[in-house]
Image (cartoon, coloured by chain):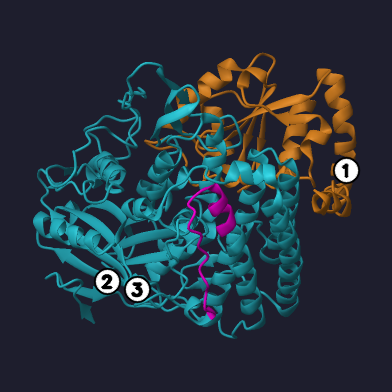
């Protein structure tokens, strides 16, 4: 136990006040406003249900990174939940496969109104390298309505934060 | 150079090039294939991959490709099948891993298996009802497809009876940030009697997209088969193309590829060790390892311009170089991360609550691992010394690993604790390799231009962080991609997970699942 506590103390708080690098000034301002906005708009935390509707899992790696201590998503009152019924927002990666089309529609229908949908990654936004085919519906918006698109292959955690912010501000 | 194996009459020819040792031959008929498969199994070999190819547009029929692995290397045995009624013997009774591969091949190419050794599983695998049973996307006369009614079909799960037995269906959307798949648990109380997986939800038609593309188009797609293994796939694809075209990548490029592959391995192992802590309620472990992983990815981003190094390994060499300051940064970071991981390993090892969850949970033994043709972390955690980067009796790893002298990590316990321990050991070994590569990077060009060779084929095999990644490539008469088959180690590991959870309790499933951390996308294609 003692080495564990020592390690916690030695690590300290690594959460970044302003995520690096270039966009940092603007992002820092955005992030300062973010928790205020969430409280003002929603009166409570923003809850996200992430749905992988056919990705290569690259986008999931970066969505996971949002939970690491540097980005510390929960520190802004945003958290991932296990059910779409508990969610304010669906964060959907694509392309939407034909085999996931039905499950994605069900998840959307189960999410209470008002709801937001953020399409993540080049594939979620346009179908990407996989496009639309016998096995793929292509972009998320071909299956459910989309509010905000976050392109990138995969988008960086900072880009994901910006996208989530943009959706809340709408 | 030709060679026979185990006194079987089939004569194999060595594939040219610098890649992993591959021997190719054609079976005379189905019986020939069966006999050879039995012989491989008897000598504790494994089934590495199985796929089909439509060659009717060339005036031939269909071709079945089987890749077996022995200590000496990979044996690529194919079998020509007639254009009408293409059927081959079911291999699943010899190699259980064949079951899902054969069903996927029937769904996609429309070649059937019957007789032989298995029970002839009639259920589809990747086809869920988005296209009709008599339409096969990888046939050249299939057209683009699409426009079919998407009519998700019922799936005939094996039912478990008896008093108190019931089912828990989970998925396809899971309760976390994870890829989709369906798990059907049969339980009594909290104890798992049986787990049956249904996969294919990530099927996005990757293999059809390769057909007709250029070698460069294929490279971009290969890097997106399983994002967490983008370097392994990019290298396996490049190695297959290079073998087909008789191209040897320059020494500096080979070393840089290994550097990227090892960086990919460390990144994933760091993430998995954090997630394993999290699933055993040690949030401290999650925070610490995810912090280290983020540090690691940021250096990737700074040095390669991409946090996961996508599209940096290309046929002919690499698309990125590293200068002296970058190499110094890598050496320094390896020192720093190594010190931290050493401390964290001690904390994990001595944490009673964590070890209580890890030890004797999700156990599989070496005999089962061998029976299922398992590779990678999960196989080495049962004590099997299977690592394509390391020397073993009769096997010399391909460059640059032959010169690096990789020490494979093993643990014989076969449980979650063993899979964690193998990851720790592999992080330290990869950090050592990275430092060795960084200080001894040879000078040469980075990438050589080459023209595709018509009607050529090649196989690339790479030891990715999860296990053995394999890509088979066939070029057409114009030097474009006629068929590309990527094979993820998850094909063999998903059935092992079904075994690992038996007799454990439902709440341990997330932990056991995470200790395997398998790819859905790489499997579903």
> What hue does chain B carry in this figure?
cyan
Q: Chain of mark 2?
A: B
Q: Chain of mark 3?
A: B
User: Relative to the observer, which residue lies in front, B68 or B244?
Assistant: B68
Decide: is B251 above or below B69. below
Circles 3 and 2 on the same chain: yes
Q: Are marks 3 and 2 in contact (CB under 8 Å)?
A: yes
**Chain part drawn in magenta:** B404-422
The answer for how far apart the CA atoms under marks 3 and 2 are is: 7 Å
- Expressed as whole percent of the image width and height from the top left, the position of residue B19 reads 40, 73
Q: Quadrant of the N terminus of chain B?
A: bottom left
At x 41%, y 19%, the residue is B166
The residue wearing badge 2 is: B23
Residue B78 left/right relative to B312? left
The residue wearing badge 1 is: A28
The residue wearing badge 3 is: B21
B339 falls in the magenta region = no
Q: Are marks 1 and 3 in contact (CB under 8 Å)?
A: no
Decide: is B222 above or below B248. above
User: Relative to the observer, which residue lies in front, B221 or B190?
Assistant: B190
**Residue B525 appears in the rendering:** no
> What hue does chain A carry in this figure?
orange
At x 76%, y 76%, the residue is B325
């Amino acid at each position: 136990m003692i080495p564990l506590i020592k390690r916690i103390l030695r690590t300290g708080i690594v959460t970044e006040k302003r995520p690096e690098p270039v966009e940092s000034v603007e992002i820092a301002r955005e992030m300062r406003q973010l928790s205020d906005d969430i409280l003002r708009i929603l009166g409570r935390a923003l809850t996200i249900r992430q749905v992988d509707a056919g990705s290569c899992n690259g986008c999931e790696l970066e969505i996971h990174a949002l939970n690491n201590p540097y980005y510390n998503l929960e520190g802004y009152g945003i958290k991932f939940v296990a059910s779409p019924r508990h969610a304010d927002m669906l964060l959907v990666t694509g392309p939407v496969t034909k085999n996931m089309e039905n499950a994605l529609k069900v998840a959307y229908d189960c999410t209470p109104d008002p709801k937001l949908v953020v399409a993540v990654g080049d594939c979620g936004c346009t179908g990407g390298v996989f496009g639309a085919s016998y096995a793929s519906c292509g972009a998320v918006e071909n299956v459910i309505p989309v509010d905000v698109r976050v392109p990138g292959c995969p988008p960086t955690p900072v880009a994901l934060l910006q996208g989530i912010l943009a959706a809340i501000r709408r | 150079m030709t060679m026979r194996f185990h006194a079987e009459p089939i004569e194999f020819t060595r594939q040219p090039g610098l890649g992993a040792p591959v021997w190719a031959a054609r079976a005379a008929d189905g019986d020939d294939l069966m006999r050879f498969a039995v012989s491989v199994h008897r000598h504790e070999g494994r089934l590495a991959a199985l796929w089909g190819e439509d060659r009717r547009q060339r005036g031939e029929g269909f071709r079945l490709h089987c890749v077996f692995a022995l200590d000496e290397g990979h044996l690529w045995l194919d079998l020509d099948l007639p254009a009408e009624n293409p059927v081959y013997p079911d291999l699943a009774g010899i190699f259980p891993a064949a079951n899902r591969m054969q069903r996927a091949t029937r769904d996609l190419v429309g070649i059937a298996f019957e007789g032989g050794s298995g029970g002839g599983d009639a259920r589809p695998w990747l086809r869920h009802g988005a296209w009709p049973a008599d339409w096969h996307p990888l046939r050249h006369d299939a057209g683009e497809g699409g426009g079919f009614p998407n009519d998700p079909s019922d799936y005939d799960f094996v039912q478990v009876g008896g008093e108190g037995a019931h089912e828990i269906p989970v998925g396809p959307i899971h309760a976390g940030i994870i890829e989709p798949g369906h798990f059907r648990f049969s339980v009594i109380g909290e104890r798992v009697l049986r787990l049956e997986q249904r996969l294919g939800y990530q099927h996005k038609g990757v293999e059809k997209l390769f057909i007709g593309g250029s070698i460069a188009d294929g490279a971009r797609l290969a890097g997106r088969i399983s994002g967490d293994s983008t370097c392994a796939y990019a290298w396996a694809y490049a190695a297959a193309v290079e073998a087909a075209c008789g191209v040897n990548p320059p020494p500096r490029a080979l070393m840089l590829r290994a550097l990227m592959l090892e960086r990919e391995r460390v990144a994933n192992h760091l993430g998995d060790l954090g997630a394993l802590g999290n699933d055993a309620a040690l949030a401290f472990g999650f925070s610490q390892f995810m912090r280290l992983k983020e540090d690691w990815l940021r250096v990737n981003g700074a040095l390669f311009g991409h946090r996961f190094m996508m599209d940096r390994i290309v046929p002919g060499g690499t698309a990125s170089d590293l200068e002296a300051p970058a190499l110094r940064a890598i050496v320094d970071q390896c020192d720093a991360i190594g010190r931290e991981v050493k401390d964290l390993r001690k904390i994990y090892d001595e944490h009673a609550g964590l070890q209580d969850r890890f030890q004797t949970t999700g156990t599989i033994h070496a005999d089962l691992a061998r029976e299922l043709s398992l590779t990678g972390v999960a196989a080495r955690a049962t004590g099997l010394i299977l690592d394509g980067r390391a020397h073993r009796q009769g096997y010399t790893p391909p460059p640059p690993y032959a010169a690096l002298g990789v020490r494979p990590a093993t643990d014989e316990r076969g449980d979650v604790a063993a899979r964690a321990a193998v990851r720790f050991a592999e992080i330290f070994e990869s950090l050592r390799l990275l430092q060795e590569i960084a200080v001894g990077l040879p000078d040469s060009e980075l990438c050589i231009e080459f023209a595709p060779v018509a009607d050529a084929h090649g196989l690339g095999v790479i030891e990715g962080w999860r296990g053995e990644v394999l890509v088979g490539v066939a070029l057409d008469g114009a030097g474009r991609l006629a068929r590309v088959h990527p094979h993820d180690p998850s094909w063999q590991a998903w059935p092992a997970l079904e075994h690992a959870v038996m007799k454990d309790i439902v709440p341990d499933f997330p932990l056991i699942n995470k200790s395997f951390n398998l790819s859905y996308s790489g499997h579903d294609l």
